[in-house]
Structure formats: structure tokens, C-alpha cells
Amino acid sequence: MLKLLIPVLGDKEATEAARHGAFLFAENCVSEVEVIEVLDDLAQGRVGAFHARSELHRSEKERARDALMQTCAVLDDAGVPYTWKRVFGPPEQTIAQYAAKDHADIVVLDASHLGFFHRLTVLARLWRWSSIPVTMLR
């Protein structure tokens, strides 16, 4: 059985990835689903010079809460057991590192909210940094 990793990127929900994960769970293809909330570490950029790190993390968490709740609601409605964790860092690199560390078998990324060129950039970076298969839904 596979372990599925669904990243929620910042304030963008991953409902399509959650629906796909629920389908795979119903078909007995997936035994574990893990949702990670990936927040860009704003404190590393120029904004960190003007605001406290804790303040930046708090504002990021507040903006991302709705996206995470929508994604988890899809899994809850389908009766899929899952775990979730919040991580900070550059999205593609953080997803690849977390997937490798947590021994995920596949990453399902909802790219419906990304533009065409941004989608290609994200996918290229994930393929470069990750040794785990990545499925991108749009």
C-alpha cells in the first residue's frame, strides 16, 4: 500500500489532490494520507528586516488556515484517515525533503491555482529535487 503526501501551498487549498487521494483510498490503493501545510519562510527575505519572525509566522498561519481546512474537509467527508503537519521553507525544496524524510511513496500536488508557467516551474523543481514520483493535478 502507498503512502500519499498532499502539500497545501500557502493560502491555496489542495482540494483536487484531496479528492484524488480520497478516490485512491476508496480503491484500496493508498493506506496512509499525510497533508503538509507548506508555508514560505517570509522571515528569510527582506520582510524579515522589518517585522518580527514570530509575527510573520503568525500571519502566514492565519492566511493558510482556510486552505488547510478546505483540503481536510474533503478528506473528512470521504472518511479518509490522515495526519497533517505544518512546515516552513521554499515550497518545492521543502516538499521534496519532507517526502524523502517521511518515506512517502507519491506526492499529489494540486496545481489548479497556479498559472501555466508557474506550474511548469514548480513541477521542474520538484522533479529535480525529489526522487519520489510527483503527480500534478490541474
Image (cartoon, rainbow, N blue to C red):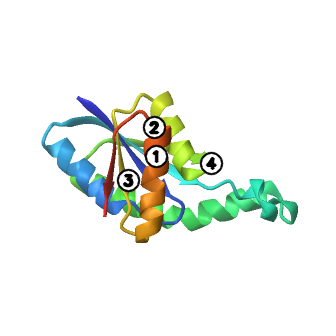
SS at badge 1: helix
Q: Are marks 1 and 2 in contact (CB under 8 Å)?
A: yes
Q: Earlier in the sequence, mark 4 or mark 2?
A: 4
Q: Earlier in the sequence, mark 3 or mark 1?
A: 3
Cα–Cα span, label 1 and label 2: 6 Å
Q: Give residue 53's quadrant in the image.
A: bottom right
Residue 109 disc label: 3
Could you tell me the amino acid type at mark 2? Answer: Ser
Q: Pointer 3 and pointer 2: residues touching (CB < 8 Å)?
A: no
Disc 4 secondary structure class = strand
Question: Does residue 23 appear in this view?
Answer: yes
Quadrant of the frame with the N terminus: top left
- Numbered label attached to residue 88: 4
**Depicted 97 relative to depicted 35: above or below:** above
Residue placed most toward the observer, 22 or 46: 46
**C-alpha separation, residue under disc 3 versus residue under disc 2:** 13 Å
Residue occupied by mark 1: 126
Mark 4 or mark 3: name the one nearer the start of the chain: 4
Q: CA distance from mark 4 to mark 2?
A: 17 Å
The mark that comes first in sequence, 1 or 4, is 4
Gap in Å between the C-alphas at discs 4 and 3?
Answer: 17 Å
Q: Amino acid at mark 1?
A: Leu
Q: Which mark is residue 130?
A: 2
Q: Give coordinates of residue 6: x percent, y percent.
A: 39, 48
Residue 79 visible? The answer is: no
Asked if the residue under mark 1 is in contact with the one under mark 3, i.e. CB atoms within 8 Å, the reply is yes
In front: mark 4 or mark 2?
2
Q: Dots 4 and 3: beta carbons under 8 Å?
A: no
